Image: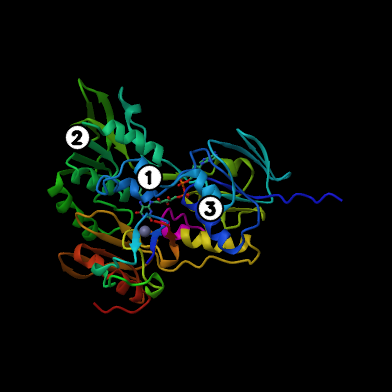
Amino acid sequence: MREKKMKPIVVLGSGLAGYSVIRELRKLDRDIPVTLVTRDSGDYYSKPMLSNALAQGKDAAGLVLTRAAEMATQLGIKLLVQTEVQAIDRTNKKLATTAGELEYDKLVIALGADPIRIPVQGDAADAVLSVNDIADYARFRELLENKTRIAIMGGGLIGCEFANDLASAGHAVSVIDPGPWPIASLMPEQAGKQLLAPLAALGVDWHFGTSVSRVDRASSNYLLTLADGTQLQADLVLSAVGLRPRIALAQQAGLEVNRGIKVDTHLRSSDAAIFALGDCAEIDGKVQPFVLPIMHAARALAKTLAGTETAVDFPAMPVVVKTPAHPLVVLPVARDAAGNWQTLATGDGIKMGFLNQENRLTGFVLSGSFAAERNEMSKRLGQVITS
Amino acid sequence: MKVWQCVVCGFIYDETKGMPEEGIKAGTKWADIPENWACPDCGVAKADFEMIEV
Ligand SMILES: Cc1cc2nc3c(=O)[nH]c(=O)nc-3n(C[C@H](O)[C@H](O)[C@H](O)COP(=O)(O)OP(=O)(O)OC[C@H]3O[C@@H](n4cnc5c(N)ncnc54)[C@H](O)[C@@H]3O)c2cc1C
Ligand SMILES: [Zn+2]
């Protein structure tokens, strides 16, 4: 009798999430067939380095850590690059792709997120760039040649990182953000404001409490008109206003979605054969588009895929903000968390803790010289702080 | 002596050089680095490093 061919685990997306889950799975099992489908080149690169590549002296090609073909060999997988997934047929456990149909035994969705584009008026509105992957970055660097003035829409984590990287490389940078201070979604006022002076000293010009309403072509560059009437010249406009999880394929397939693809602590969606992780996923109610949650999720999911059901258990995961002009580490708290931010120390920077109603430390921001206290602060989490 | 690379950000740990600025002496074997050590560039754990050939 002919042996029935084993259907593969199919992973969608070759970013950190897709590759990490396969890398972890291969530590546990070399034999399960795995197919990875991606619409990009499949080259493995470090996305966080997109916002500090100038300081590192790297261009887009220099950010590639491992070429696609080598990844496929190392991991022992079938790799389909430049292949777009178009639909998931859950009943027949099949995918429609631009390279034809594919069957799966289990499916892992790691499709990432799309940059949010805020509507802007003006005849150059479509010239606004977003940088969310290495191909975007290559284009950005090409356009950056001989350009001086860069306007960045969005003063969040990624906007501030790009501002630091570009200003350090000698560009004049304007940051425009409707919020009240830098990285306001993660940081309290006194902490966020620590970034203002060090980045201004590098040549960053801040515009808070307003947004870009028009981008028009001027003679050799662009003219930005802000909602408050201010006009700015820029040679290049970068948008970094946030990301939206890619949920369309999952939604069309009838999977439960909210902001991201809804999965439980086992990374399992509303279909028992389908899992999700990374920027596209909402794990146990939370979208956490950062490296550390992805690494933890990948490790847990790999165990489950190898046959040992494993829930992800996230430790405290502080986010390091790559602003060398003023180092920052933040362990954010939920927007609706009860408690308040308190200043624990000041000096060359600030140390702040978020204390819950029992005065226990549940979040923190360390800036400037305090950034080095990351491990000590993490150890104090849950402890009662008397300031 | 071996060389290890952070799979997330590409940070290199070279056993020959160690990381004196982090208190890790030149010649320190990867195996002797504490398990709770984190990548200085991106914060991921020691477990997220892989050995690379040089
Ligand atoms: C500039 C920048 C700096 C950052 N810095 C940090 C940092 O310092 N620290 C930190 O913790 N996090 C940082 N992040 C966040 C972190 O990089 C991301 O959370 C992480 O890389 C997301 O990985 P992912 O695999 O989920 O998504 P992605 O890397 O976006 O991968 C998605 C994959 O899906 C593929 N795909 C999408 N649609 C389809 C389709 N229909 N068919 C086939 N393939 C498809 C794409 O081609 C891609 O391969 C940063 C992000 C950015 C943009
Ligand atoms: Zn690293």
A332 is within the stretch colored magenta? no
Q: Which mark is residue A74?
A: 3
Q: Position of residue A152 (x, y in %)?
A: 26, 39
Q: Residue at x 38, y 37 (%)?
A: A136
Q: Position of residue A256 (x, y in %)?
A: 60, 50
Hey, what amino acid is under mark 1? Gly
Q: Residue furthest top?
A: A219
Q: Which residue is mark 1?
A: A242
Q: Residue at x 54, y 39 (%)?
A: A81
Q: Quadrant of the C terminus of chain A?
A: bottom left
Q: Closer to the N terminus: mark 2 or mark 1?
A: 2
Where does the magenta region start and end?
A284-294
Q: Quadrant of ligand 2?
A: bottom left
**Res A342 visible:** no
Q: Is mark 2 within 8 Å of ligand 1?
A: no
Chain holding disc 1: A
Distance of mark 2 from mark 1, alpha carbons? 22 Å
Chain holding disc 3: A
Distance of mark 1 from mark 3, alpha carbons? 34 Å
Q: Secondary structure at mark 1?
A: loop
Q: Which residue is mark 2?
A: A149
Hey, what amino acid is under mark 3? Gln
Q: Closer to the N terminus: mark 3 or mark 2?
A: 3
